[in-house]
Image: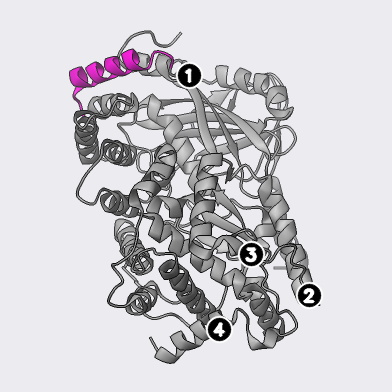
Amino acid sequence: MAGWMIAAALAGAALGADASDRLAPLPPYGTAYTPTTVDERGLWQQADEAERDLRDSPAVIRDAALNAYIGKVLCRSVGEDRCRGVRVYVVRAPYFNAFMAPNGMMIVWTGALLRLRDEAELASVLGHEFGHFEMRHGLKTFRRGRTIGDIIAWTSVISPYSTLPVSLIQLHFSYSRAQETEADLMGLRYLTAAGYRPLAASRIWERLMAEEDATALGRKRRVTHHYSAGFFADHPTELARATYLRETAGADGERGDEARDAFLTAMRPWRATFLADQIKRNDFGGSEYLLGELATGHWTSDLLLTRGELYRERGNPRDLVSAAQFYQQAIDAGCTDPIAWRGLGPSLLRGQQAAAGRAALKTYLEKAPAASDRAAMAMLIGEGGVQ
Amino acid sequence: MNKFGIVAIGLALIAAPVAAGNRLIVPGQPVAVAKSMLTVTPAVEWNKLGARPGRNSETWTFDGDALNDLTFYGGIEPERTLFREVSKRNKPLPRVKATMLVTDIPTLVENSYRIALDTPLFTVEGMEPMAFAGKPGIRFTYSFTRPNEDLPRKGEGRGAMIDGKLYLITFEAPRLHYFDAGVASFRQVADSAKL
């Protein structure tokens, strides 16, 4: 990582805005900020329209507690005055992503929340996205795009995930590599200033690299890890990001607050949903890696249960044996969710262990007398059946 | 070959996709569906679509498949997918397994839809035993939302594992009006299924 780049980025960040933006000196997060130039007005109008669509989308999670927590972390990391200019939307999508529109609409995907380990990491992602907003990257990209042609129009068509309203996908800004680096370093500055552990930022990218590799291996693809960014890449490679973030964090990168417990408490009500969405992606390698990563040597009952579901849903003969073991381990680890027995029973039945399978399903029916699949599960053990 | 012949062959080539296209299903007569031995006898007129979601499947509709979609899956073999796989490397679909129990069918449908449609908004609402073509089967209900639209849709499926192959009939439509308007005709078709 070139030192001058970091210096330039930090200097740019300190100024708050690029020298070319002299016409719009006010920060975009200010109260009742009005876009000043014709370009900026147009961009904000588009973003406002996308936000109206997103606001009513069924993909947005409206849980008050979760949204309040994310708002709180954003405010702690970028400061009370800045965070008021931002609306955060948590969107249900099982991939790692977060992005920021030029009008202060921030979007965080639930797959990112599942993959982050503590509050410091969440703060680093939110700080990074806020950096794009504060430095008006959307506007600069738009201007550059207009000069060099229709590149923006094309990149916006290639969206990795399409749960979002169409207008939002059209607004899917891809920032340039230099801007991403700038936002990364800005995020790091917020992280340090807020007293979070600065090394948190680099760890995210290290884990994402390993997960991508695991997905590729699981799908019998060549591990094509990007150690250098391609000509058309709009993000620096994960390796480059991990490295310069680690270097900039410096020797005392481990110091500072990580607030792991607060993060896990806030995510607890949603974790089962996020885990279920993950394994339904049919990405065996990536999911298996992620579960191991979340466990970090200590397999809790909810992770064991999810691992059982992952193996049972793939359903190869040896997977069914493993699935039954994981369900049993989850039960031994204190799992009280009837789903454990609902998974254990059919895994054993499919693995030719009829008596044990029937016993597990009997337990399920006792534990979940009002389940919507009760009659179907009862049929599997010969109680009731086809009319 | 004379000019007329060439023109005739050209016309035949152009006409071929039209002939293999959408077709009216006449009520009251047994008809084999989804390139399989599965036959059904509809009580009302349906339109069969020329486009198939996969190899052993077939779609019928009243007003277009966005408004009411009745799809037959006629014996999907083990290690095959429910629909045509768009990208085996990047978006692989779950595969049918010979050991699948009838209670695994809704999960297969759910995961296939989530991946193929790119939506996390899919819920299996409930399931209960129900005979399918005289064999032990399952009836299940679900709800989902396609990406890029906020329209809630409802679905109902009837399926069974017969000789290790998956037989399934699904009906789905927007929750508003179309599901309730068409579901009785779907149930009549599903009840008439024979193998």
Residue A12 numbered mark, or none: 4
Label 4 – label 2 distance at C-alpha: 20 Å
Residue at image mark 2: A36
Q: Residue furthest right?
A: A38
Task: Classify mark 4: helix, strand or loop.
Answer: helix
Q: Are marks 3 and 4 on the same chain?
A: yes
Residue at image mark 1: B133
Asked if residue B84 shows in the view, the reply is no
Front-most of residues A62 and A313: A62
Q: Earlier in the sequence, mark 3 or mark 4?
A: 4
Q: Residue at x 63, y 23 (%)?
A: B186
Label 3 – label 4 distance at C-alpha: 20 Å
Query: Residue A194 occupies which quadrant of the picture?
Result: bottom left
Host chain of mark 1: B
Task: Classify mark 3: helix, strand or loop.
Answer: loop
Query: Residue A36 occupies which quadrant of the picture?
Result: bottom right
Query: Is A70 on the left-hand or right-hand side of A223?
Result: right
Query: Which stretch is magenta?
Result: A351-370
